[in-house]
Image: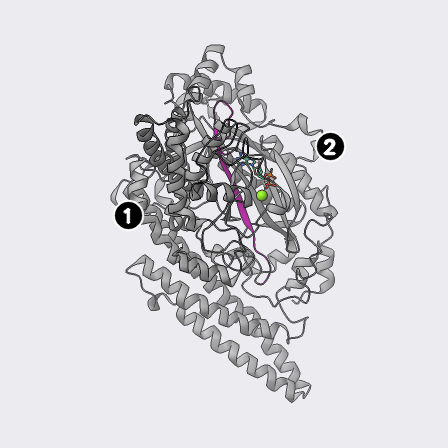
Amino acid sequence: MPRTRQQNVLAAQWAPNGHSLGASDLTAPDNQVFGLNVFSPAVQRQRLPRDIFRRLQQTLARGEILDTSLADSVAQAMKDWALERGATHYTHWFQPLTGMTAEKHDSFYAPTGEGTALAEFSGKELIQGEPDASSFPTGGIRATFEARGYTAWDPTSPAFILENPNGAVLCIPTAFASWTGEALDHKIPLLRSMDALSKSAVRALRLFGDASAQRVFTTVGPEQEYFLIDEQFYFERPDLFTTGRTLFGAKPPKGHELDDHYFGSIPERILAYMLDTERELAKLGIPVKTRHNEVAPNQYEIAPVFENSNVGSDHQQLTMQIMQNVARRYRLVCLLHEKPFAGVNGSGKHNNWSMGTDTGKNLLDPGDTPHENLEFLFFCAAVIQAVNKHQGLLRASIASPGQDHRLGANEAPPAIISIFLGYQLEEVFEAIERGEAGETTPGSFLGLGTPVLPPLPMHGGDRNRTSPFAFTGNKFEFRALGSSMSPSFPNTVLNTIVAEAIDELATQLEDALQGGADLEAALRPILQRTYAANKQIVFGGDNYSEEWHAEAAKRGLLNLRATPDALPYLVNADAESMFSKYGVLSERELESRYEVFLEQYVTKLNIEAETAASIARTMLLPAAARYHAELLAAQLSDLAGETSELIERFTDAIRALESANLSENQPHDDVLEHARYMHDTVLPAMSDMRAAADRLEKVVADDLWPLPKYSEILFIK
Ligand code: ADP
Ligand code: MG
């Protein structure tokens, strides 16, 4: 039955009290709910025997292996706390290579046989679980090993309680591995990469005379973009609920040309949603820093306060889940896809990244003294070298079908990786390269005539929004992540490549110091060489411009436009030797990721193609045919002729897509070849068909067109 526009508008009205969860404390001040559902160090201090608490914290601070004798006490305290908070079940919460999180719930209660149940939860159950690994992607590891896998407690990421209107579940962050010890998830390599970076950075810090830092943590603060649309439109669009993006839709008469949405005032229903989401996140100990409208209509952004990479990545996964759950309370759907609407800005995730010591020093903060400046320039140079050397790997770490619609589309960073240092920092490195940093007079910074580096701008005009990798005052911002993506893998890559570069530069510095040079004299030529050898990656101009693409090609920078172009860089010789040298991913683990990511690419495009063809045949073609019949019945032969031409073209395009997506027409021997086929043959067939459908959308009677249009989806709030 055809919808009416009125139905849609009615659907857009909302009932803020249509849910019970969270409503009761919506007006409580933030400080009363913050961390309410987290088994935080503060809760642990209250509930654990003093000695156990102290030993646990020590283990965590030093990054040592957990003494399993602690587990029973912790489990007991965790269970009591969770039961008091209303939990009936617990789950090991983990991140398989699907990119989503997984849970398997077990009840705390075991029947006693006398008609009662006893709450049980032992250290063994805390430490280890056994989900069946065979249903998760393992990219070959499964084929050669047993199907069994196990989850292992990650005590460095606090356990938390997920509430539901009908109960609550204790979630224990865990790593997921095969019985042979191979990582089957995104957490294990991330933890290993944090260790690798810590070792390299502490080694370097010693050369700078820092004897107190024991550990260096990488930090992450992801800024998340998303769309909110009315629930009714979502459920009326099988493309949206099956693939996360619209596979059809003509450009609306009004887009973001007017720029009237960005940073505009937030509509009431949306603000109510944001407040509720932030309240839920606060309960989970996830502090939200900013919220605002984004560029596209119905597009928004949320940014948390940064945390260490492991906890920050767990929290980012939770944030995406909570954002989607809470939306439904307001009859909204939260879209995290990178490109839900063609021709409209897509969504990304800005990955703010830095390194900090356990003594509280940010290694990417220029500091206030010449000595701190030297240290800062050293770590900065390491990042520049790492990003230049491993451009392809970084690009591969953020590759997905959704991203292919966005990167390089003049709205997001291009597929070319480059670094924006900002005018001042670039000048400093240029001067060092020119050798102007020769003589150092007392109080002058590397002979540049300033006592110390000026504070580098963090905000405002000096920002280059088009750069995929930008220095922003005291951190780098890797801007090319996709909105739906777990930050774990890109950060694993970032940590490891920087660990390698720090190590290489530290070796050079060590050699020079052993030769008797003082720190500054030893460092100067290293900075000079490193910058000169890697400055091709530094670019301060407009990354969207044609000229940059030409210039980047001249410089020999990689421009990996699509996922099948990028993924092979995961497994090239440089990547393989680095990952195994730093113990982050073995060759087999790396290969398995490569396979899994390629398989996911193929599968996702298969699903898109099938969904598109089916909507075309069973929804759009019938609508067009009905309209055509109406025109004939009304004896409007001119119009009927036009329409029938469009219908014919559309029908041909449907057939072409169906044939391209037939399994027997696809290469199955090699998964990379298969991915290329999907990119080169199936995707173009989909866009052809879409173009024909979008023309029909503009012709067929509005009451017959079965899909809500962009103009409705994007502008009704
Ligand atoms: P900007 O306006 O330059 O983007 P903000 O201060 O608004 O900077 O921060 C943006 C994001 O960067 C926030 O999520 C914030 O927590 C994060 N961030 C700030 N400092 C760091 C850091 N040292 N490491 C990682 N992320 C950081
Ligand atoms: Mg930012």
Q: Nearer the viewer, mark 1 or mark 2?
A: 1
Q: Verify whether residue 351 appears in magenta.
A: yes
Taking the image as shown, residue 492 lies to the left or right of residue 85, namely left
| Residue depicted at x 58% and y 45% | 324
How far across and down, in percent of the image, does residue 235 sit?
Answer: 60, 56
How far across and down, in percent of the image, does residue 513 sit?
Answer: 34, 27
Check the image and tell me how it is coloured. Answer: one colour
Badge 2 element:
loop
- The residue singled out by tag 2 in the image is 27
Residue 30 higher or lower than 242, as above or below: above
Residue 573 is tagged as 1
Number of dots carrying numbers: 2
Q: Mark 2 or mark 1, which is nearer the start of the sequence?
A: 2
Quick one: 578 or 437, which is closer to the camera? 437
Q: Residues within 10 Å of mark 1 (few under 14, many from 20)?
A: few
Q: Verify whether residue 428 appears in magenta.
A: no
Q: Alpha-carbon distance for marks 1 and 2? A: 56 Å
Residue 249 higher or lower than 20, as above or below: below
| Residue depicted at x 49% and y 11% | 49
* Residue type, label 1: Ala
How far across and down, in percent of the image, does residue 583 sit?
Answer: 31, 35
How far across and down, in percent of the image, does residue 522 sit?
Answer: 37, 31
Query: Which residues make up the magenta segment?
Result: 343-364
Asked if ligand 1 lies within 8 A of label 1, the reply is no
Let me know if residue 63 appears in the view: yes
Quick one: 506 or 157, which is closer to the camera? 506
Taking the image as shown, residue 573 lies to the left or right of residue 127, namely left
- In which quadrant of this rendering is ligand 2 seen? top right
Quick one: 470 or 321, which is closer to the camera? 470
Quick one: 162 or 56, which is closer to the camera? 56
Q: Quadrant of residue 707?
A: bottom right
- Pointer 1 with pointer 2, Cβ within 8 A: no
